[in-house]
Image: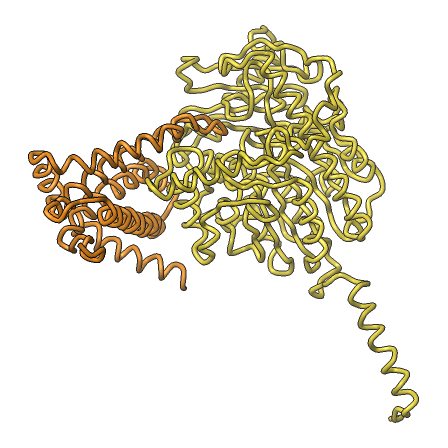
Amino acid sequence: MKRLSRREFLKLAAVLPASLAFSRFSSRKTVGRAERPSVILLVLDAMSAYHLSLYGYGRKTTPNFERFAGRANIYHAHYSTANFTIPGTASLLMGTYPWTHRGLHLSGLVKREMAHMNLFALLGEDYHRFAFSQNVWATNLLLQFESDIDELLPSSAFSDYAFLVSEAFKRDEGNAHQVLDHVLFDYVDAPGLLVFGLAQRLYFERSRKALDRQYPRGVPQPRNHPIRFKMANVFDGLMGTLTRLPEPFCAYIHLFPPHSPYRAHRDFIGIFDDTPPHIEKPEHIFSEGESYETIEKNRLWYDEYIANVDFEFGRLLDYLEQNGVLDSSYLIVTSDHGELLERGIKGHVTPVLYEPLVRVPLLISAPGQQRRQDIYSPTSSVDLLPSLLHVTGNQVPDWVEGRLLPGLGGQEDPARRVLMLEAKSSSAFGKLRQATFAMRHGRYKAILYRGYERIGRDLVEIYDLESDPEEMHDLSQQQSPVIAGLTAELLEQFEQINTLP
Amino acid sequence: MPFSKRFPTCRQIVPVFALTAMLVYGWTMYRMLEKLPSWLLYLRPDEIASNFSYALVFNFLECVVVSGLIVLLGALLPFRRQEHEYFIAFGSSLSLLGLGYLVYLNWQVGASKANLFPWEIFAWSPFVLALILLAAFFVPRIKTLRLLLEAFADRTIILLYLFLPFTAIGFVVLLLNNLF
């Protein structure tokens, strides 16, 4: 073998530092499996598809989503399985409906024996599995999957001020979270600690008063937890995080905005003041008695908050594009549920399942995708897990209740039946005695209210979403074979799902 | 009287600590038991035990802080030498009234709407606390009340036989959960 001369050695020695420096900046860290695509799953809590200009809303709330749509698959009839975080998020991460995973309650968890049937576990150790949720209830759920996640950030990450006691108990965060943050230092109800709990609450409320002038309606924070954050800081933090994760990675990011309280940055306040008011809908039997004026005010605040989220998303999109992340990653943007601002109802803690509450955005950009594809067939959040497993080269287990999304291995099926449930008042382990169950089948949507004292009997509503997208004209009393068939199908479906797990 | 001599004896502190513990532990157990039905469905017995461990340990710390404050106030307030025996009645009334007031405040906070903290009830706090302190200072001077308070505080000591061993177990559970 030829030996290196002194001159050759010096040449090599001169090149070595430069090549080392170059390698540090030129390529992102990998764990040797970079041929598999990374996945960024961005969940924006309580973002209703109904309020996005991307889907035709009157106010220009989402110019950056529309820009992203130019290189993504847009799902126009995508439904969450429920109208609040726990069941919606669990379905998204587990590919099963709420009656199967049983995460039915506001601060509930999924069935213990199903805790390993989640996206992170199924992707396996080939992926660097990262999770971050600003919604503490979703973090609680993620803690159930903790053993399948490589990196789980606390809800307070990237925030300006947080008081989550459980973070001091890293090795026992799940239990600490349950008892400290939810009971002893309760931020919603009376604190469980007579002295420390009240002292902490006073400290938190006092600091709340020192509101940042950038946020005239208050600095954004999760509704029930004292985590205060500036949206720009959170997105900056995410940019840094997403470019440091070893590839291939699966990053589940669950951001609290635009969930209430709607607290847009001052730059977005007043941007829609000249928009004509929304159609006034009749009060529902489950109306909370909110006046039309109150609802309109909240609708405006919500829309402004969405515009704020959209702006930050635009910055994130630019950053990911510039850093080449989207060349090797799927970027999925969706929500765990929607929001309702009509019929005397404000928010999503309600038994109803109208479109603004359950129809959520879904945009998926494949690595390097440059073309827009619009998909109009009904799809469900349970479809995400099998689709992601499919595109990452993993097997889809038999127990998964979703199917492959069109554009990700599946076919468009306009007659697809998609189901939704609200059953927070029913036992998580017994039969559903009080529930709202909805079914989107083709152009129709049928809703069943069962077990509500306020109604006193089964109530069915049926809407033709093609001719009546605002769900104003209930067809359930019409005498027609189609309506009768839908009613029978709805009741039969409910009986099928309402079996003991 | 030298300042060090103004502190109560251990025999005097224990009944006050016991009464404080009754209120502090009692409130937390009341709030915890509200959650228990859902925990029974969602959590394993060891997880529920762990939750109670946190509560017991935090309660013990609260009792130490509150009792310490009462002892300090007892030493600072101008009790005369012959009133030295008043500490149990003083501490007990202060504990009962002070923690009772905290129960009221906690209830009000719990009943308030999200993001609408009831600051108005806290505006009266300095006045109410001064009144409580004044009452605790003068109550021991009424013999019947003093005897009643002493007897009551003395009987609450029995609860310490329950609280303290369970807290010790809770502390061990908490340590094990967080170390291993």
Q: How many labels does the image show?
A: 0
Residue A393 x %, y %: 69, 53
The correct choice, above or below, for A254 with respect to A218 in the image is below
- Quadrant in the picture for residue A217: top right
Q: What residue is shown at x 67% (from left), y 45% (from top)?
A: A233
Q: Which chain is yellow?
A: A
- Quadrant in the picture for residue A462: top right
The answer to whether residue A414 is visible is no
A68 or A289, nearer to the observer: A289
The answer to whether residue B50 is visible is yes
A276 or A401, nearer to the observer: A276
Residue A412 x %, y %: 73, 33
On the rendered structure, is B140 left or right of A300?
Answer: left
- Quadrant in the picture for residue A473: top right
On the rendered structure, is A22 left or right of B16?
Answer: right
Residue A27 x %, y %: 79, 62
Residue A282 x %, y %: 58, 8
Quadrant where the image shows the C terminus of chain B: bottom left
Q: Residue furthest right?
A: A7
Q: What residue is shown at x 68% (from left), y 57% (from top)?
A: A245
- Shade of chain B as shown in the rendered figure: orange
Quadrant where the image shows the N terminus of chain B: bottom left
A440 or A191, nearer to the observer: A191
